[in-house]
Amino acid sequence: MFKTFFIACVVVAAGLCPAVAMSGGLGTILDRSRFPAELIIIRGDLDRFMTESSLSRLERQGLEGRIQSALSGLLWLSQEYETLTKHAVDETFISDAQSLWRDRKLDDLRQLVTISADLYALNLEIFKASRASKQDMERVSEIDTTLCQGCHVLSPGSPSTLPAYRLKEFASTMSSHEFLARLLSGIRGSGETTLANPLTLGDVRGFMRLYRSSLE
């Protein structure tokens, strides 16, 4: 079933190791979710950057680069979100956020990103763990065992710029919204899928149930 899956060899912006390819994908559901997901991820990365004393120098360096990259891409994502949802985005907050980051006013930046994440909210309802079917769980359990656990083997303090943390430990450090955001933005496929997230809606629900339902 998974012989055509491909493990990409890079770590992407959301902090989850790229994994599977060759499935139906999320289509416009993902397109509409990228901008609000990125806001949640930036807030989570800021929290770790500001408060995690156990992070190694290289981990902090990786977080810093990821936040910088995410802020640089917000304008494009906001325009995509506005086009698809017809929900107007006040883009001035993006330049304000970039200025706050440049000036290292991290508390102010986190507050601004939090307000924006609440305003342009990620819809958790459609991805709820309780909606995962038996078939969804069978599929994601195999994906998790065959692919995810082979990559996600590290813990905080690792001498790596963008380590793939153990998913059970990583999921326990964040809200359902943040874990969902990282599932949506943090997984990439192969060149055959133009590196698009290959997970289906059922896959995302299954991973939410596998890693988050016991924490709620």
Image (cartoon, rainbow, N blue to C red):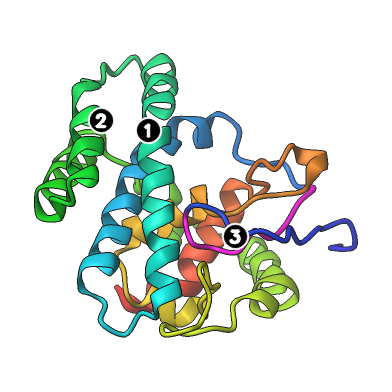
Residue 73: percent from the left, percent from the top? 43, 34
Mark 1 touches mark 3? (CB < 8 Å): no
Task: Report the residue at 20% width, 36% height from top.
Answer: 99
Q: Which residue is identified by label 1? A: 74
Horizontal side, residue 111 vs residue 31: left or right = left
Residue drawn 50% across and 48% down? 185
Which quadrant is home to the N terminus?
bottom right
Neighbour class for label 3 at 10 Å: few (<14), some, many (≥20)?
Answer: some
**Amino acid type assigned to the residue bearing label 1 in the image:** Leu
**At 21% across and 67% down in the image, what residue appears?**
50
Q: Nearer the viewer, residue 34 or 124?
A: 34
Q: Which residues are magenta?
A: 14-22
Q: Residues within 10 Å of mark 1 (few under 14, many from 20)?
A: many
Asked if residue 37 shows in the view, the reply is no
Mark 1 or mark 3: which comes first in sequence?
3
The residue that mark 2 highlights is: 94
Q: Tell me which amino acid carries mark 2.
A: Ile
In the figure, residue 80 lies in which quadrant? top left
C-alpha separation, residue under disc 3 versus residue under disc 2: 24 Å
Magenta stretch: helix, strand or loop mostly: loop
Residue 202 part of the magenta-drawn span? no
Direction right: furthest residue: 3
Q: With 126 as the anchor, is 142 left or right in this view?
A: right
Residue 11, relative to residue 116: is it above or below?
below
Expressed as whole percent of the image width and height from the top left, the position of residue 48 reads 28, 68
Between 69 and 103, the one lying in front of the other is: 103
Badge 3 is on which residue? 11
Q: Is residue 59 above or below residue 72?
A: below
Is residue 17 shown in magenta? Answer: yes
